[in-house]
Image (cartoon, rainbow, N blue to C red):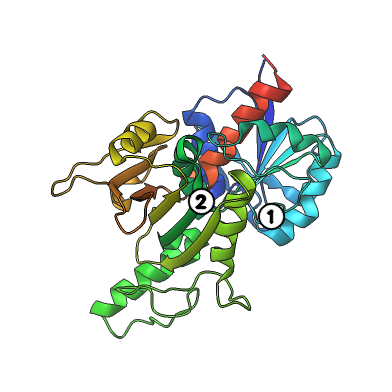
């Protein structure tokens, strides 16, 4: 016996990836529905070897459905998620709407699986920000062993983080460099993204940080440990898919780089590729389509007493969004709903 599953926002990048991953991981599905806005009604999407036609989100009745994976913006989620939850369907939400709600668990299954039992307060579970998700998977085993005091992270985030429009803009601007007659004016990004980097993701806050940077701070505290101090600089780079992060970690107890390498290698969701030779590390291009979060460049930070540096790379459409949501669905099924 399987689950009745809804994917909301099935025609977007993340929604399509959710359907792909549900099929790839052979999630136990009895019935599945692909929902989209009325303007996308009838659009065909793939689910394994099946083709689904999207149904109208406005007219859908969530009664009798076990879980809904939401991949729509916060505004639409605010309208539809409570309707699904009230109908008894557990919502797994990829937007930022519920991440900071104390009554909604924010979950990365490799890090805080026990939090899933808090879903019942609102019948909603939140999926973290893409940049946070991959980082906390790497932080968890180090924190368990040596207690992390402080994290300094610089991100290198791909354009797919803002959806198809961001990918199209990078493509169009790259072509325009070689054909200046093409329109290359920035639309989705604040400045030209092709052959450039932009230290600005989301809106600026009063303290000079951006909201993306604030998200990494707040979400790491909620998922891992509120005592961890985090400072982040988030940068958009001209890469289509795959986020990278340079992470500096200060711990209470000393942790040797070799032990850290072994800890990370043995931890769920991580793959260590760390050879001190040309090409002995993973880059965003190589992580696309993979479930793992890759760790490279593990080394001691000699400027502080107990410090480590590492390089963290992951497919942001997978671990940063769709994969994590499916892993939450698996966790929910295994630990709470327990069908089949």
Q: Could you tell which of marks 1 and 2 lies nearer the N-terminus?
A: 1
Q: Is residue 66 left or right of residue 319?
A: right
Q: Quadrant of the C terminus?
A: top right
Q: Nearer the viewer, residue 122 or 63?
A: 122
Q: Marks 1 and 2: which is nearer the front?
A: 2
* CB contact under 8 Å: marks 1 and 2: no
Element class at badge 1: loop
Residue 227 horizontal/vertical position (percent): 61, 50
**Which quarter shows the N terminus?**
top right
Q: Which mark is residue 60?
A: none
Residue lying at 37% horizontally and 52% vertically, measured from the top left: 305
Residue with the most extreme bottom position: 181
Identify residue for label 2: 149
Determine which residue is flagged by label 1: 37
Look at the numbered disc 2 and give the secondary structure of its residue: strand
Give the vertical position of 190 relative to 144 (above or below): below
């Amino acid at each position: 016996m399987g689950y009745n599953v809804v994917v909301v926002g099935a025609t977007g990048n993340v929604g399509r990836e959710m359907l792909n991953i549900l099929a790839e991981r052979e999630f136990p599905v009895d019935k599945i529905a692909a929902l989209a806005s009325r303007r996308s009604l009838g659009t065909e999407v793939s689910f394994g070897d099946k083709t689904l036609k999207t149904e109208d989100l406005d007219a859908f009745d969530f009664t009798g459905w076990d879980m809904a994976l939401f991949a729509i913006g916060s505004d639409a989620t605010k309208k539809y998620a409570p309707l699904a939850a009230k109908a008894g369907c557990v919502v797994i939400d990829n937007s930022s709407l519920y991440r900071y709600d104390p009554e909604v668990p924010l979950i990365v299954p490799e890090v805080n699986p026990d939090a899933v039992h808090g879903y019942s307060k609102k019948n909603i579970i939140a999926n973290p920000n893409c940049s946070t998700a991959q980082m906390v998977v790497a932080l968890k085993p180090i924190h368990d062993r040596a207690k992390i005091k402080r994290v300094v992270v610089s991100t290198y985030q791909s354009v797919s983080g803002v959806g198809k429009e961001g990918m199209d803009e990078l493509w169009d601007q790259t072509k325009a460099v070689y054909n200046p007659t093409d329109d290359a004016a920035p639309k989705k990004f604040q400045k030209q993204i092709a052959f450039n980097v932009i230290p600005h993701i989301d809106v600026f806050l009063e303290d000079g940080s951006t909201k993306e940077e604030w998200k990494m701070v707040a979400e790491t505290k909620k998922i891992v440990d509120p005592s961890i101090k985090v400072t982040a600089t988030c940068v958009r780079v001209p890469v289509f898919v795959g986020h990278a992060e340079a992470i500096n970690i200060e711990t209470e107890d000393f942790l040797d780089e070799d032990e850290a390498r072994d800890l990370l290698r043995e931890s769920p969701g991580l793959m260590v590729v760390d050879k001190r030779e040309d090409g002995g590390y993973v880059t965003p291009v190589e992580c696309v389509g993979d479930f793992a979060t890759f760790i490279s460049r593990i080394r001691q930070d000699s400027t502080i007493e107990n410090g480590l540096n590492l390089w963290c790379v992951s497919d942001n459409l997978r671990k940063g969004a769709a994969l994590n949501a499916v892993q939450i669905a698996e966790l929910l099924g295994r630990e709470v709903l327990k069908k089949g």
